[in-house]
Structures are given as C-alpha cells and as structure tokens.
Amino acid sequence: MMNKLITIKNFVALLIMGIIFLVNSKAIAQTESDEPGSTSNKVPLLEVAEGEYIYEPRDNFETSPAYSYSSPWFTTVQVNVNELGQNIVGDAANEPSIAFDPTDPNKMAIGWRQFDNINNSFRQAGFGYTTDAGQTWTFPGVIDPGVFRSDPVLDCDTEGNFYYNSLTVQGEDYLCDVYISADGGNSWDDGTFAYGGDKQWMSIDKSGGLGSGNIYAFWTSYYSICDPDFFTRSVDAGFSYEDCSSIPGYPYWGTTTVSAEGELYVCGAQWGGNFMVAKSSNAQNPGQTVTWDFSTTVDLDGEVVGFGGYNCPNPTGLLGQTIIAIDSSGGPSHGNVYILCSVERYSTPDPLDVMFAKSTDGGLTWSSPIRVNDDPGNNAWQWFGTMSVAPDGRIDVVWLDTRDYPGTVLTSLYYAYSLDAGDTWSENIPLSDFFDPHLGWPQQDKMGDYFDMYSNETGAHLAWANTFNGEQDVYYGHITPQFTGTDELKNKTSISLSQNFPNPFKDQTSIRYYLAEQSFVSLSVFDITGREVAILINEIQNAGNYQATFSATRLESGVYYYQLQAGDDIVTRKLMILK
C-alpha cells in the first residue's frame, strides 16, 4: 500500500511531536497546517492562513474555453468563469459547497475557496450563482475581498435566502462569519459573527415546524474560538448566534442534517477511530437550551484519513469527510438515517473505500457497514465520498476514483444509487474523464476537503472540482439516474425515461431515455387536457441512450406531460413550463 495516511490513531504521536516542536519554536511545522489555537489538545489542522493578498484584476488574465461535458448520465459546466462564460487562465478554485432555492429550483448558489492567482496560496470566499437551473453561471467575485477565507458551507432557507458560512483568521483565533444573500446569491450582506472553528458545517431547518429557519453549526473542537465548546445555533434567521455549547462524543470532520420533523443530527469522526452520530430533538425549540438525546458509535470498518503526502490523491487534505443524510420521502423508508465516508478499512489493505451504514430507528442502532464501490482488487482510492437523498427516497452517492489508472493518482468521478434504502446499490457509473488532482501543487496543495451535493426529483446536483483546464476549477454537475422504478436494480426494463432537465424551464429542456432493444419509438408532449402539443421522436431506433430537445417557446406556462412509447412499453413523466 502507498504511504500510510494519517488516521485518528496516528494523531496521538503527531500531537506529542507537535507539542515538543511548539515549545522549541513557537510553531507547529510540517503538517499542511500550522494553524494557531487556544488549547493544548490539538490535532493537525486543515487550514493555514498563508500567502499574501495581492489584488489581481480579472482583465489581466488570459481566457480559454470553459470545460463542459454532457452524457445521458451526467452534464457538467464550469462555475468560476468570466462574464463571457470563459475560463480564467491562472486562477484556481476548489472545495465547493452548493445550495438551492426551494421557492425556485432554477436558482442555486455555489461557494468555494478562490485563489486569484495559481502562484499564490492566499484564498478568499468565492461565489457564483445561476438562475437557469445550472446551465450557465455568474461569478461576481469574492465576499470580503482581501480577507483570508476557507471552508465554505452554503444552505438556503424556505424563503429563498442563501447563507454562506466562511472560516477566517483573526490573530491566533479561527472563527466563522455567516453571510446572507436575499437575491439568489448575487450579492451578500456584511456577515454575522457565528463563533466557529476549523472544518465547520451548517444546516438550516426547512421542516416548516417549530424550528423552521433555525441555523445549526458545529466545527472541530480542537481549534474552536470558544474552546472547549464547538456548537452554536441561531433562532432569529441568522441575526445572531447563541453562545457555544458542546456535543457529546466530540465529533469532528463531519456534517449536519435536519429531519422532516425538525430533529437535528450531527455526525463525524471521533477519537479512537470510530464514527459517531448525535441527535437533538429539542434544538428546534427556540425557548429551550439545546440538549442531546444520545450519541452513538457507528461502525464503517475503518477510519477517516488525510495528510497522506504526494503519493495520495489529495496530498495535504482530507480524503473525504463524514456525510449524514435523512430520508424525508414519506414512504416506507421515511426517517431512515444514513452515514457515509471514504475510509481506510480495517478488514482490507485497499487504500480507501466508500462505506455506508443506515439506521431505521432514528439513529439509535446501525447496520453493518456496506461497501458502495464495486471495483475488484485492493489498489484503488475511492475518495471524497459524497451522499444526498432525493424526496422520493433515492440515495445518490458520488466519489473520486483511481480504479481506471492503478498505481497513479489519476482520478475520475463515479456514481452509484440505491432504490431500496441502501440495502443494494447500482453498478458503479463513471461520469467523467480522468484528471490529475495534483495540478496546482504546491500553492494549491489539495483539492479541498470535500464536495457537496443535494438531490431532487430530476437527479443529483453536485458541486465539485477538477483540473480539466490544467488548473483547479469548480463545476456544477447534474446527474440523471437512468432507471424507471424501484425494481430497477433487480430487473432492468426495456425502456427508461429520465426526468427532463432543467425543470421547471422557460424555453428549452432536454429529455433523456434508454432503449434495451431496437424499437419503434414515439416521444410526445401533452397538455393537461391530453392534447398532443409536440412530437419529438417518431421513428425506429436501435438500443442505446438517447437525448431529445423540447422547445416550448410557443407554449404557455403550466404543467405538461411527456410520454415515451417503445413497443408495448409506455412511460410518462410530468414537466413544468415557467415563463
């Protein structure tokens, strides 16, 4: 196996060495980070305020065509582009987070670590937004220009306000500010102090219940502005944040989520190599101090890892953090809690695997770990495992994968889904070509520490980074699962019809479908009265994946239906035109 990564158990030895070195030189060296802090029980950090801010006018940089790619499964476009939609040659971007507006799915925002010059490791809070469901993106610049920022985490409330949680440094303290945008991510307010520390995560309650609009955040306790505490809550829409408190089990390098009933869940790694989940039922109540129902250990047959050096895909960063998600479908799996992480396993010498576990009793007990990636052998890195759950209960998982180029760090994006609450998984689907994650070294010495994703009826919406332009850049990706129903994993049907994308749409949308065998195919669009308003396909087609374009420029706003018929099989889906 390649050079041993730093796991939780290794931290003890590193900690002792770091303290000795600190006594002698007043600094911690040779980790990716010599982040200062206020306590003595530190772990190696992920961020360091390095480099020097130098104003770099965008017009000074050359441009090139922005990379984009489309297939029946996956469409991706670059986000950090200039006003003409071109790639800016010489800047860099990584570690993206995404949020969408529940009042208008066409609106999304992405935040990332922005490097104005690839020759400088100084980074700021980059952001971009879309109003056409991700087809095009606007990159206005950075929040708080000239201030070192990192660890972007975005979310949106039920009224369409976007929130951007950003780590910064003041003297020897690491803290977070939360910025609010009321115009779809186009502009941001001056920010609100939200306590914080390294590797924070944030979620907003969108349950519509008692705590709807509450904001929850936690971070690594070892480098907290309010050590030893590392959790805060806002009950006034981000106007202020409560004094810090703690979470039992002391999770770190993890995420948060809120159930349809307003229950708060936190997951992360913990000392000793385990993973853990904590739950609070009363965090939603603004009149009560947050208490925790329980904290329980989860077995993923391994440990979260990072800092592996140049022989691993992400030299000085994590290879993924712990992801938690909840099924809010209202169906048989409603309330299931899922956890996923790329881990270095105990039971195999494989560098990394994407491991999954689930709870059917609100997080109290957990299943045995399940491996999501299906590659044979023990010589590939499956890193940056990322998960989200669709409103219908479909579980989407993506990760970066080196299986196609063994012995190297050359990486492709892979995808799998589950339609039976994680009991079985689809075959792994390669979504992208390969890229070299080391491009940008040493100024961009990692691809960040995570990707971010959410799922809806049309598929999965991913914020990710790659180096297809020869530098690190941020991308939006839309994944369209190619299946027709909950039996898809066991019995592949003769046709499948994907949800159109974008949806809703104004002028034009794409419809993808699959044929298992040659058939006479008809694809038509109908209004709500059943009147046929468009014939898109009416011909014999061979087996394979197809994409049709539907132009609605002459149609009124409203709900329509599109129907695919091949032989005796018929599939119908709903679309919406919004003008």
Image (cartoon, grey):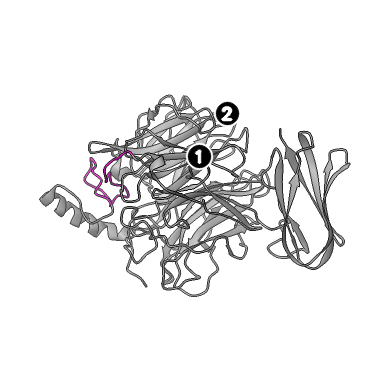
Rendered view: 462 above or below 437 = above
Instruction: Look at the image and say whether residue 185 sits in the magenta stretch.
Output: no
Q: Position of residue 133 (x, y in %)?
A: 61, 41
For the question of whether residue 421 can be seen, the reply is yes
Q: Are marks 1 and 2 in contact (CB under 8 Å)?
A: no
Q: The disc labelled 1 sits on which kind of residue?
A: Glu
Q: Which mark is residue 341?
A: none
| Left or right position of 368 against 179 | right
Q: Position of residue 476 (x, y in %)?
A: 54, 48
Q: Which residue is mark 2?
A: 159
Q: The disc labelled 2 sits on which kind of residue?
A: Glu
Q: Which residue is mark 1?
A: 83
Residue lying furthest bottom in this view? Answer: 377
User: Quadrant of the image for the N terminus?
Assistant: bottom left
Q: Secondary structure at mark 1?
A: loop
Total numbered badges shown on the rendered structure: 2
Rendered view: 491 above or below 169 = below
Instruction: Look at the image and say whether residue 44 sits in the magenta stretch.
Output: yes
Q: Position of residue 422 (x, y in %)?
A: 59, 57
Main SS class of the magenta portion in the image: loop
Category of crowding for the residue at label 1, using alpha-carbon neighbours closer than 10 angstroms: few (below 14), some (14–19), many (at least 20): few
For the question of whether residue 200 can be seen, the reply is no
Q: Which residues are magenta?
A: 33-55
Q: Secondary structure at mark 2?
A: loop
- Mark 1 vs 2, N-terminal side: 1
Q: Quadrant of residue 318?
A: bottom left
Q: Position of residue 163 (x, y in %)?
A: 47, 33
